[in-house]
Amino acid sequence: SLMEKDKKTKRVICPSCNGNGFIKIPYRLAKEETVAQCNVCSSQGEVDEEKLDSIIIDADGFHRLQ
């Protein structure tokens, strides 16, 4: 029934790639227009909500605590 607690972790859009599954590498870093797989969500475009706590955003971008 709907009253049962959903055992699956809630999935949320990855904040790093905005659900694309890949990120654009800034031209100034790669010297060419390029994209890379998003390593925050493993290119899935979504992350488990409980894992968001381990994602750090700083001047260099998004990082996941190991």
Image (spheres, rainbow, N blue to C red):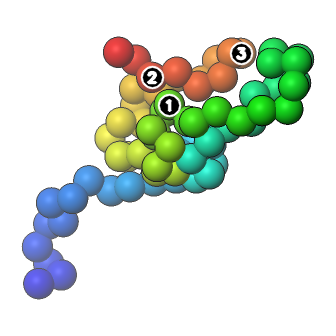
Q: Would residue 6 be found to the left or right of residue 18 on screen?
A: left
Along the line of sight, which residue is nearer the eye, 24 or 7? 24
Mark sitting on residue 5: none
Q: Earlier in the sequence, mark 2 or mark 3?
A: 3
Mark sitting on residue 64: 2
Q: Residue 2, position in %: x, y?
A: 18, 81
Amino acid tagged 1:
Asn
Q: CA distance from mark 1 to mark 2?
A: 9 Å
Q: Who's the residue at 35% across and 15% down the image?
A: 66
Q: As drawn, which residue projects farthest toward the bottom?
A: 1
Q: Secondary structure at mark 1?
A: loop
Quarter of the view holding residue 10: bottom left
Amino acid tagged 3:
Ala
Quarter of the view holding residue 61: top right
Q: Who's the residue at 15% across and 60% down the image?
A: 7
Provide the residue designation for mark 1.
39
Provide the residue designation for mark 3.
59
Whether residues under marks 1 and 2 lie with C-beta atoms below 8 angstroms apart, the answer is yes
Q: Earlier in the sequence, mark 1 or mark 3?
A: 1
Q: Who's the residue at 11% across and 73% down the image?
A: 4
Q: CA distance from mark 1 to mark 3?
A: 17 Å
